[in-house]
């Protein structure tokens, strides 16, 4: 059957059986895409926790609510996993990016799989103008990083992450070092901060707390025990 071409020919391509076979393979490859996991559907009722953070960079406190879905309820494999997150505050300055952040985080939670990577991603965000010290003397590089710390704390509470900390022997050593330092400097009248660390202590790069002092010629943290001398 002849076909009359009314328009001017500007280009052409030769169709061969090999070309048709390649197209069929490409279509088949697209249809065989394997999804890593199906998004979780929202039940009528969720359990969760609300955390309050007050920073020197915001006038009002932020309230972070993380709701969990209970998986395999009533069985030995019952466990909680995060499903959605909300952040509320009277301060509207950060409203847009906070809403965007919580929606993306909630989408990741509902997708399933390992969501613990969010902690490191959030905690690695640094404020260009510098971070701040929160109550307890711990340095926080940004408001986003502190949100990441809240997520980390929640994942630890529900068992998705291990809680960090010193073992019995390490804690005993740190307590002995702190007691030794306080005993040697009490008579000198050295002032302590509200957390019980010397006011002149340096920032520990391991626990981000201003608790590192020089003991026996070595910089030692009185909070986590980190020492430059090993």
Image (cartoon, rainbow, N blue to C red):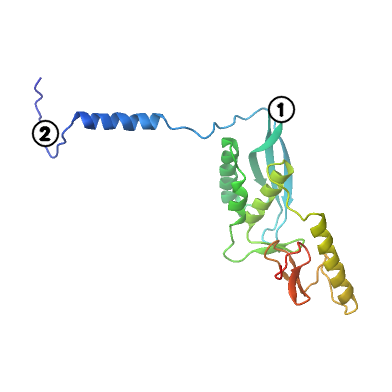
Say the numbered circle drawn on residue 7. Answer: 2
Horizontal side of 104 relative to 167 (left or right) equals left
Which class describes the residues within 10 Å of circle 2: few (<14), some (14-19), or many (20+)? few
Q: Position of residue 116 (x, y in %)?
A: 62, 45
* 82 versus 118 height, above or below: above
Q: Quadrant of residue 12?
A: top left
Residue at figure coordinates x 59%, y 36% from the top left: 110
Q: Is residue 24 left or right of residue 164?
A: left
Q: Is residue 1 above or below residue 161?
A: above
Residue 73: which disc?
1
- Badge 2 or badge 1: first in the primary sequence: 2
At a point 65% along the width and 28% down the height, the residue shown is 43
Q: Please tell me which residue is depicted at 18% across the width and 31% down the height of the picture.
A: 15
**Farthest residue, direction right:** 187
Mark 2 and mark 1: span between their CA atoms?
A: 68 Å
Q: Residue at the location (67% across, 37% down)?
A: 81
Quadrant containing the C terminus is bottom right
Q: Is residue 41 above or below residue 60?
A: above
């Amino acid at each position: 059957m002849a076909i009359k071409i009314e328009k001017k020919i500007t280009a052409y391509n030769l169709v061969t059986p090999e070309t048709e076979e390649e197209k069929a393979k490409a279509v088949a490859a697209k249809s065989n895409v394997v999804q890593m996991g199906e998004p979780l559907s929202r039940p009528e009722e969720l359990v969760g926790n609300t955390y309050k953070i007050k920073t020197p960079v915001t006038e009002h406190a932020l309230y972070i609510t993380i709701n969990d879905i209970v998986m395999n309820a009533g069985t030995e494999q019952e466990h909680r996993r995060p499903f959605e997150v909300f952040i509320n505050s009277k301060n509207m300055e950060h409203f847009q990016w906070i809403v965007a952040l919580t929606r993306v985080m909630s989408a990741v939670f509902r997708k399933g799989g390992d969501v613990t990577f969010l902690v490191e991603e959030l905690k690695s965000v640094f404020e260009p103008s510098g971070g701040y010290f929160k109550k307890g003397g711990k340095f926080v590089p940004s408001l986003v990083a502190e949100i990441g710390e809240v997520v980390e704390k929640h994942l630890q509470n529900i068992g998705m992450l291990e809680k960090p900390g010193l073992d019995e022997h390490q804690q005993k050593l740190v307590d002995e070092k702190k007691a030794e330092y306080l005993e040697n400097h009490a008579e000198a009248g050295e002032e302590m901060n509200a957390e019980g660390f010397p006011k002149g202590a340096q920032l520990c790069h391991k626990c981000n707390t201003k608790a590192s002092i020089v003991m026996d010629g070595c910089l030692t943290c009185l909070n986590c025990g980190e020492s430059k001398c090993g």
